Image (cartoon, rainbow, N blue to C red):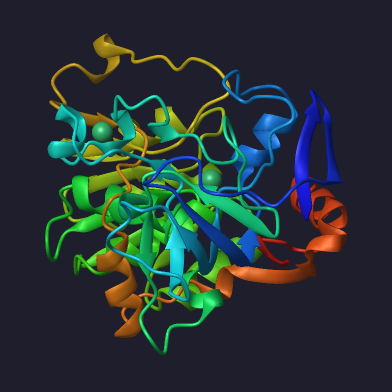
Amino acid sequence: MLAYTYVERGRFALTEKPRPAPRDSRDAVVRVTLASICTSDVHIKHGSVPRAVPGVTVGHEMVGVVEEVGADVRTVKPGDRVTVNVETFCGECFFCQNGWVNNCTDPDGGWALGCRIDGGLAEYVRVPHADQGLDKIPDGVTDRQALFVGDILATGYWAADIAEIPEGGDVLILGAGPTGLCTLACAALKRPGRILVCEPDAARRALAEKMCPGALTFAPKDAAAFVRANTAHGGADAVLEVAGSADSFRLAWECARPNAVVTVVALYDAPQTLPLPDMYGKNLTFKTGGVDGCRCAETLGLIARGAIDTTPLITHTFPLARVEEAFDLFERRLDGVVKVAVEP
Ligand SMILES: [Zn+2]
Ligand SMILES: [Zn+2]
C-alpha cells in the first residue's frame, strides 16, 4: 500500500509498505477513506518532534472504515465508519480514569500514531486500543464533516471546555489557524456575549467571521486597544491562546481582564516568559496543555445536529498519490490553504 513516510530529518516520501494487520487483541485496522495534514507533521519533517521515529508513516488526522479487529475489540466491528483519535490511550490507568488521556501511561499512550507508530497518510492504519481510539461516525455525517474530530476539533472542544467561558461574557481567541477556528466553533457553543478573534491574516479573519457570524476580528497590532474598547471590564473574561507566535503569549495575558482565565493551547518553538512582576495584582489563572481527546462521540453528536461545522476549513483536496504536492502547499501556506483533505 502507499504510505507517506518520514524518511529522515527534512525528508518525507511516498513509499510502498505492506498492509498492516492487528498485532494485539485490542488492535483494529482501518481502511483510511480521508486524511489530512497537520502543522505537527511539518514539525516532524523539520526534526522538532524528538519522539518521531524515522521510517514511520506520518498522518494523525483521518477517518475510515474498520477493516479488521482483534479478538478483544468490543465497540467497533468491520464495516463501521469511524474517526481515529490522535491519541492512543488505555482507558484503565490513573490518568485515563480521570479523563487525562494525554498522559496515559501505556507504552503506546499519548500521541503515537504518525509519530512513534505508523499513522494515517496511507491506505490502511493499525490503531492500538481500538475501543478507546475509534468512534463511530453517525449516519448522515460525511467523512469531510468528521475529518477533524480526532485531532484539531478535539483540541478546540477541550480548550473551550477548560477555559471557563462565562455565558454572556467576553471571550478572546488568539489565532484563527485551523486549531483556532475549531476552538472558535466550540467556544461559540458556550454562548458568550462577545467573541473576539485576533489574527494577522485577513483571509483567515474572513473565514472566522463566516464560521462564527458576529465574531469581532482584528489584527494583532491593534490588539490591546481593540480588546479594551470591545469588552465590558477592560479585557476578556476568558482568553484562549491558539496562535503560538512570538508575541501571542504576552498578548494573551495583557488582553485578559483581572481575575480572568488564560488557556494556552499553542505549541511554541521557544520558551516563553511569565513576567510575574508585570502582571502582579492582575490575579490571573493560567491553564496549559495538550488535548485530552476522549470526547469525540460528543463532538460527532454536535456535528450530526448541525451545531459544529468544520468543513469550511477544507480548502484543498488531493489524492494520496499527490500527497507530496499537498504537503508542499500546506507547509508553504500557498494558495490560501487552511486544511488539505487527502483521499487514499
Ligand atoms: Zn495534529
Ligand atoms: Zn491510560
Q: Nearer the viewer, residue 257 or 20?
A: 20
- Residue furthest to the top in view is 277
Q: Which image quarter holds the N terminus? A: bottom right
> In the displayed structure, would residue 134 be above or below residue 26?
below
Q: Nearer the viewer, residue 283 or 15?
A: 15
Question: Which residue is drawn at the image coordinates 33% and 34% (left, top)?
Answer: 102
Q: Is residue 344 visible?
A: yes
Q: Which image quarter holds the C terminus? A: bottom right
Number of marks present in the image shown: 0
> In the displayed structure, would residue 276 be above or below residue 211?
above
Question: Which residue is drawn at the image coordinates 26% and 12% (left, top)?
Answer: 276
Residue 199 image position (x, y, % from top left): 54, 52
Q: Quadrant of residue 67?
A: bottom right
Residue 296 image position (x, y, % from top left): 32, 61
Question: Which residue is drawn at the image coordinates 43% and 83% (left, top)?
Answer: 141
On the picture, is 51 further left or further right than 277? right
Q: Quadrant of residue 80?
A: bottom left
Question: Which residue is drawn at the image coordinates 35% and 41% (left, top)?
Answer: 291
Residue 308 image position (x, y, % from top left): 36, 75
On the picture, is 54 further left or further right than 60? right
> In the displayed structure, would residue 81 be above or below residue 328?
below
- Residue furthest to the front in view is 71
Residue 125 image position (x, y, % from top left): 59, 52
Q: Nearer the viewer, residue 128 or 273?
A: 128
Q: Is residue 284 visible?
A: no
